[in-house]
Image (cartoon, coloured by chain):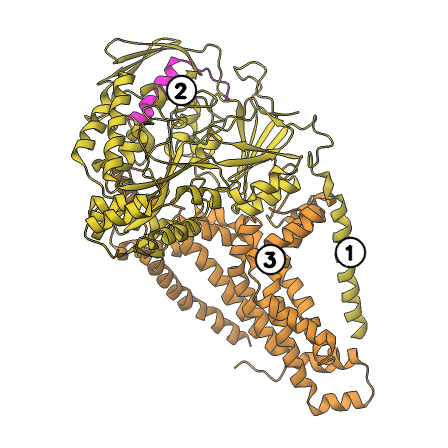
Chain colours: A orange, B yellow
Amino acid sequence: MLSYVVRRVLMVIPVLFGMSLVVFFMIRAIPGNPAQVILGQKATKEAVAALTHKLGLDEPWYVQYVKYIGGLLRGDLGESIRTGAPIAKEIWPYLAATIELSLAAMLIAVIIGVNAGIISAWFQNSWFDYIAMVLALIGVSMPIFWLGLMEQWLFSIQLDWLPTAGREDVRNPIEPITHLYLIDTLLSGNTDQFWQVVQHLVLPSMALATIPMAIIARMTRSSMLEVMKSDYIRTARAKGLSMFWVVYKHSLKNAIIPVLTVIGLQTGLLLGGAILTETIFSWPGIGRYIYDAIGYRDYPVIQSGILIIATIFIFINLIVDLLYAIIDPRIKYN
Amino acid sequence: MRKKTWLTWLVMMLAVTLVLAGCGKSKQTAGGGSDKPSTQDTLVYGRGGDSVSLDPATVTDGESLKVTKNIFDTLLDYNDNDTSVKPALATEWTISKDGLTYTFKLRQGVKFHDGTEFNADAVVFNFERWANGNADKFPYYGSMFGGYKQDDSHVIKEVKALDKYTVQFVLKRPQAPFLKNLAMTPFAIASPEAVKKYGDKFGEHPVGTGPFVFKEWKRNERIVLEKNKDYWEKGYPKLNRLIFVSIPDNSARLNALLKGEIDIMEDLNPTDLKQVEGNKEFQIFKRPSMNVAYVGLTATRGPLKNKLVRQALNYAVDKKAIIDAFYAGQAEPAKNPMPPSIPGYNDAIQDYPFDLNKAKELLAKAGYPNGFEIELWAMPVPRPYMPDGQKIAEAIQANFAKIGVKAKIVTYEWATYLDKLAKGEADAFLLGWTGDNGDADNFLYALLDKDSIGSNNYTYFSNDELHKILVEAQTVSDENKRNELYKKAQEIIKEEAPWIPLVHSTPLLAGKANIQGFNPHPTGSDKFTKVEFR
């Protein structure tokens, strides 16, 4: 087990190296000169040339790449060419905002998705099953942009329950400690602000949760149906065990493994959906940080941002793989 | 096991109930409703993007200048509704007969936010700083004053302090828009001590003499400014705090306004106008137009090389229908490349009327009786002058189709779009421009002179006669003679038709009904000194 973990962690290095190479060249393949974009539509040719030179963008690609990798090895993620701020210093608040949002979304998606899937499977072909699966189908194909605006319209403006945008009330801002505001407000013991943070989280995390929730529900349902056909479940039911006993004690453990894979993948994909959600809800997260950077051709930010997301994605998958072994002892890692 | 699951469910349900219960309290957002307006002293301004730097001399983006306008003062300022100049840090000035020497009397007793004194030395320090810079450090300085210290084209020969409160500018040659240039936000006077102290980081620690003092900047979220208690304009500013928040999506920003999270929003979609207009809690602010939206016709490509073809396309576009459909009527049709508010505007010019027969006739005369095929590029981002590039392109496509011109709509992501335009790769394309300083040069020379090919002259239109006039107009200091030159320039442009000028739009802002003293300025940068809540 331990050697497996070590091997997996070591494998991360070439993967990230490859990633850095791909990202490096892909973003340079997009037309558009960062200096031009940064200086704006109104800049003179001379200004653009001067800034291009200052940023080192007129150097050959391999010099730029070697410099970049050299920096990475020293733990230097580079500087944003738009703002000049060091990325390593700047990135955590954005990352923290996205982590908070994604965890909240995943929590909603897993709890509702898994349970809806179970109930659907148990009462297969019932009205609940039909409604849940139709909703899941709608959920998968729902554009987050539209959903987000509709949520704002209904829950914020019509019902006046929840705030529309941002992470906090700008008139009563939160003093960041860890930048995970749920934790920060608890640490400072300010319950009013804690609720403020929860309220700000509800709409964006619901929007973000929709697609993974739908996929998890469908996956759980089909996986449960599979398991429930097996003899040992029939035996358990024949013994007169109650639904919950059968489901949660006997079926779920076996049914959950493919679901777990989906959850792992979806958590990674969440980061993609986060860009749209973060734009609609003006959530200052890493999705928007990278999205803005793409607009400005801010190469170092795009490179380092994507690399960090890739790292997180790889580790999520590692954790999922390790969870298999815990849930299903038949799986051995050698 | 069973119990545990039920317990989890129970806790979850409880949590959800608590959240919803908590929501009931969300009314407490200060000043959210109109019930306690008089105590409101914080204004939250919602905009689409964040600033790049708060050192106004180093940036060209409007979002940065919008904020610094309130932290810094310039020697001269624009009047409330146009770009004529009025005293600010300079109280009076004299201009020598030859137009080469400008002497300014400075306001006394003004302090920078760091407590140091504003005087003639501070002014000299700032101009020296910019003049010794370069295009990448201080881009606007070079483009407005002809370059930097070592350049021959540099307009400013020297800036000297005659005494503590008198400063003199000596120019190498007359520059007609000199005073207007001085009033531009990028040339705001910064505290020399603070510039020395913070060096490259001054853009994160701006110190000026303006009505508001910089407090906090959380990137991509908000910039917080606080009242300057020692502001030289007695009794002002009215607000205690001014917060700029970025909400990228126009519709989401409107939602935030309707919910009371922000007090003013900019870039209201014209299509949302009705929603706010019918609501007593809100008011609409109209920014005087200083922009132009146009269809560029790249004069080096295919049939568009032919002047008759470009004229024909001008006859084929129904501007009125476009304004009604996509601007909710909040725009006027454009006949010149600059808006009527700019001195030198040629109102005598008759626009090409919407006349399909005339267009067909011209096409036949040019040798294209059956039309031709072109690409029409649609802007991928909304701008105040172009709320929906894709839809407007479709309308123009339909117009063109009626005279046999098949336009294929093409679009790219914004940075790519501009990059490809600068290389002259588009046939016909949608674009626009918002003026910086209310001067005709800032439209005509910047957009249509042959010198600007490769930067902002995306149509690659090159005309020697026009060039001669525009260059001459840059050095003439007699206002009337200058205006005559610009009028002549517009005649040439009308005849050569490198553009289809579409509209001059009125950018819309929406705000709480109880806001007063807010006068959106045509430049797009607003000073909040006199704004307050009733």
Looking at the picture, how far across and down is residue B348, in whole percent?
A: 31, 27
* Residue bearing mark 3: A147
Circle 2 or circle 1, nearest the eye: 2
As helix, strand or loop, the secondary structure at mark 2 comes to loop
For marks 2 and 1, the one nearer the N-term is 1
Q: Quadrant of the N terminus of chain B?
A: bottom right
Q: Secondary structure at mark 3?
A: helix
Q: Compared with residue B499, is residue A204 higher up or lower down, i.e. above or below?
A: below
Q: Chain of mark 3?
A: A
For mark 2, what is the residue?
Answer: B84
Q: Give how far apart the Cα atoms at labels 2 and 1 are.
A: 59 Å
In the displayed structure, would residue B246 be above or below residue B191?
Answer: below
The disc at residue B17 is: 1
Of the residues shown, which amino acid type is indicated by label 1?
Thr
Badge number at residue A124: none
Asked if residue A51 can be seen in this view, the reply is yes
Residue at mark 3 shares a chain with residue at mark 2 = no
Q: Characterize the local packing of mark 1: few (<14), some (14-19) or many (20 or more) Cα atoms within 10 angstroms.
A: few
